[in-house]
Image: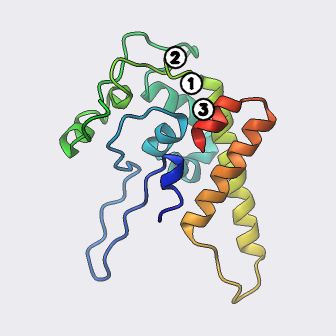
Amino acid sequence: MDPMAGMGMPAMPMAMPGAPAAPPTNQKQIKIPLSNLGLILADAGVELKIMEQLEDGEQDIANKIWIQYGGEEDGNVDEGKRGKRTDNEEASDEEIKATNKTRWERLPSGQNLEDLEITLDDFVNAVKFLSYGFAKNKSKEQGAAPGGGMPGMASRKLDNMVKLAHNLDLLGMYSVADRIL
């Protein structure tokens, strides 16, 4: 069983040996309504953004994702940007391509970020905690003894998500922490 499935995080598809590599993309194919912060961050490819754009800063990364999913630059939510996905059917590949520039349409039907009780601060805190976790894991990898092995990607993702939820609990953001787990 995929440990990420219980947290609303999609599994990463594995390529077959000898098969041509898929073109690199930060788009994870999430075909259900993005009803929580974890799903939105996974859909946005936050891990890749952090690794590739960390020089932009966590705040800028969070702002870009916030705007993609219906937020405004001033931290408010654009009331007109509402989701269109329904629970009773998975999104098609065509819908995923069609909503690449209008990602707020991937939210549950008729809902926006405010309806989901997700704020810009939630995005910023999540990106900060994830980037801290990645930096910490990177330092552990560099300091590891040869032959010690490296934990699997799913194990690291699970650890990062648990750490993120724990830190959100410490900040009193219980509902956000619950959405991640």
| Residue 57 showing in the rendered view | no
Q: Is residue 129 above or below residue 84?
A: below
- Tag nearer the camera, 3 or 2: 2
Residue under label 3, please give it: 123
Give residue 40's position: percent from left, percent from top. Answer: 47, 37
Q: Amino acid at mark 3?
A: Phe
Say whether marks 1 and 3 touch (CB < 8 Å).
yes
The 10 Å Cα crowd at callout 3, few under 14, some 14 to 19, many 20 or more, is: many
Q: Is residue 14 above or below residue 41?
A: below
Residue 67 shown left or right of residue 63 in the figure? left
Q: Name which of mark 3 and mark 2 comes first in the sequence.
A: 2
Choose between 1 and 155: the one closer to the eye.
Answer: 1
The 10 Å Cα crowd at callout 1, few under 14, some 14 to 19, many 20 or more, is: some
- Tag nearer the camera, 1 or 3: 1
Task: Report how far apart the C-alphas of labels 2 and 1 lie in the structure.
Answer: 6 Å
- Residue at disc 3, secondary structure: helix
Give residue 164's position: percent from left, percent from top. Answer: 69, 45
Residue 117 shown left or right of residue 100 in the figure? right
Q: Residue at the location (43% across, 43% down)?
A: 43
Q: Residue at the location (71% across, 72% down)?
A: 141
